[in-house]
Image (cartoon, grey):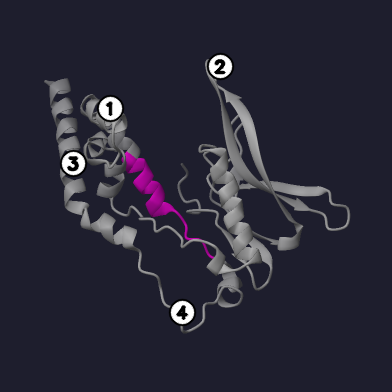
Amino acid sequence: MAFWAYESEPFRFDRTTRKLYWFRAPRRKWPGYEPIPKPGKPEIKIYDWENIRAEVTRNMVTNGNTAGRVSYLQLAVLDPASGQVLERFRIGNDSLAGPFSDRVALWETIRRFMEEGPHAVPDAVDKFQRVTLIDFWDACNPLTRLVESATGGGRLWGRILSIPTTLLAPLLLLIGLCHWIAYRTARKVSWGELDTTVFKLPPTAQPKVNLAQAQFEADTPRRRRFVFILLGVFVAEVVAFFW
């Protein structure tokens, strides 16, 4: 988590220019940890599509007690003259979680878009955006597990664990507050002159309706009720502590 940093580091693949554009935010390096975003001037990096090579990598990771395999998609930028790798960077889900096949499917979607066109790839999946403090508290609220769509044992264990986890209300509310502050202080991505040249949409382009956002907002009353219950637990714990 970082305050006053850029909200994301998007990639844009352009079939017209045959280039990959990367909005690279400045990052702070910590020994032994992944670099985290920090305030500063971003860098817009541009690569030729013909010099990009995909690499789906599997690694073994361990925490000292357990070990497991993780996979991720990374792109290698090649020197057109020598074929040497000049740079590598990950793309897509950067949590290093998820099956190997998902990384292959992501690259195949990118490749088909660039080589064959938009008709060769499925429609993008709509995603909702949390905006209010209630939304971010809801993201940390274990009571939300009671109405999750998971089925079978996963839903049962979610319901069982949701009740005792509410005792961590002070910590959960603090985490949600920090995430909300990070969202409110995040800087919007701006591509500069590219927004008015390469990325400019034609006048006839119609904005896509985000159905996921509409459904998320329609569920606001339910989420607000669960957040108020969590706040009630927090107040009860404070009163009990000072009693």
Three-letter amino acid code at disc 2? Answer: Gly
Q: Nearer the viewer, residue 59 or 235?
A: 59
- Tag 3 near tag 4, CB within 8 Å: no
Cα distance between the residues tagged 1 and 2: 27 Å
Judged by depth in the image, the label closer to the viewer, 1 or 2, is 1
Q: Earlier in the sequence, mark 1 or mark 2?
A: 2
Which of disc 3 and disc 2 is earlier in sequence?
A: 2
Q: Amino acid at mark 3?
A: Phe
Spot occupied by residue 207 in the image (x, y as percentages of width and height): 41, 73
Judge left or right: residue 67 versus residue 186: right
| Disc 3 residue crowd, few under 14, some 14–19, many 20+, Cα 10 Å | some
- The residue that label 4 is drawn on is 205
Q: Which label sits on residue 157?
A: 1
Q: Give the structural element (helix, strand or loop) at label 3.
A: helix
In 3D space, how far apart are the residues under numbered discs 3 and 4 (Cα atoms)?
40 Å
Q: Hey, which quadrant is residue 236 in on the image?
A: top left
Image point (33%, 58%), residue name: 212
Amino acid identity at mark 4: Ala
Q: Nearer the viewer, residue 220 or 185?
A: 220
Q: Which residues are magenta?
A: 176-190
For marks 4 and 2, give the one nearer the viewer. Answer: 4
Residue 233 coordinates in the image, percent (x, y): 16, 31
Q: Earlier in the sequence, mark 1 or mark 3?
A: 1
Q: Is residue 37 magenta?
A: no
Magenta stretch, overall SS? helix
Residue at disc 1, secondary structure: helix
* Label 1 Cα neighbours within 10 Å, binned few <14 / some 14-19 / many ≥20: few
Q: Which mark is residue 226?
A: 3
Dot 4: element: loop
